[in-house]
Image: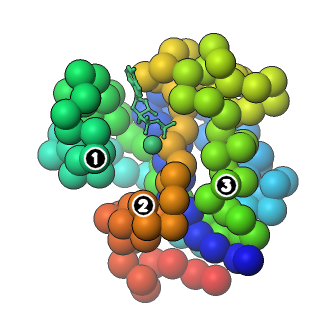
Amino acid sequence: MSERTLAIIKPDAVKKNVVGDIINRYEQAGLKPVAIKLIQMSQSVAEGFYAVHKARPFFGSLCSFMSSGPAVVLVLQGDNAIKKNRELMGATDPAKADAGTIRKAHGANIEFNAVHGSDSPETAQFEIGYFFPGMEIFS
Ligand code: IDP
Ligand code: MG
């Protein structure tokens, strides 16, 4: 079933000049970008995006990282897009990520791990709406 997921190419990956490599991986896997933009989040925008993690010890550091430079936010569309993107990304900790995954290739550690992907249909709906009004999404 075709669905949509929210992906972010995080500031660490933008700095490393691997935006093109990561988007190529999405496209090769059948995940089509239907919305895309380069943005720099403020601390409060990052805090709103990651509100579900606000009690975690890494929350402040995570939000500083996510607002430290420009990031690419995308809506990806395709069959089983949410699960497929999580598979492409690999485990949260790049050291534990499978060979061939984005985080294995480009993540530095459990925090600076190159990419974000929605983890369920409910979070995808919230996350897509957080960054994109409907008129900026194409299909
Ligand atoms: P996910 O990105 O694989 O879904 P989450 O548990 O939702 O992982 O965590 C969100 C983000 O918070 C991670 O991608 C990573 O950047 C950061 N993070 C997760 N766990 C830790 C940690 O233990 N220390 C520091 N940062 C973390
Ligand atoms: Mg998550």
In the rendered image, residue 46, in percent from the top left (x then y), is placed at: 26, 44
Closer-to-camera residue (43/89): 89
SS at mark 3?
A: helix
Quarter of the figure that contains the N terminus: bottom right
**Gap in angstroms between the C-alphas marked 2 and 1:** 10 Å
Residues under numbered marks 2 and 1 in contact, where contact means CB atoms less than 8 Å apart: yes
Q: Residue 123: which disc?
A: 2
Residue matched to label 3: 83
Count residues near mark 3 (Cα–Cα under 10 Å), then give few for <14, some for 14-19, many for 20+.
some
The amino acid pointed to by label 2 is: Thr
Quadrant of the rendered image holding ligand 2: top left
Q: Is mark 2 within 8 Å of ligand 2?
A: yes
The amino acid pointed to by label 3 is: Lys
**Gap in angstroms between the C-alphas marked 1 and 3:** 20 Å
Earlier in the chain: of badge 1 and badge 3, it is 1
Residue matched to label 1: 52
Count residues near mark 1 (Cα–Cα under 10 Å), then give few for <14, some for 14-19, many for 20+.
few
SS at mark 2?
A: helix
Residue 83 in sight in this render: yes
The amino acid pointed to by label 1 is: Val
- The residue that appears at 70% across and 76% down in the rendered structure is 2
Q: Is mark 1 within 8 Å of ligand 1?
A: yes
Closer-to-camera residue (33/69): 33
In the rendered image, residue 58, in percent from the top left (x then y), is placed at: 28, 23
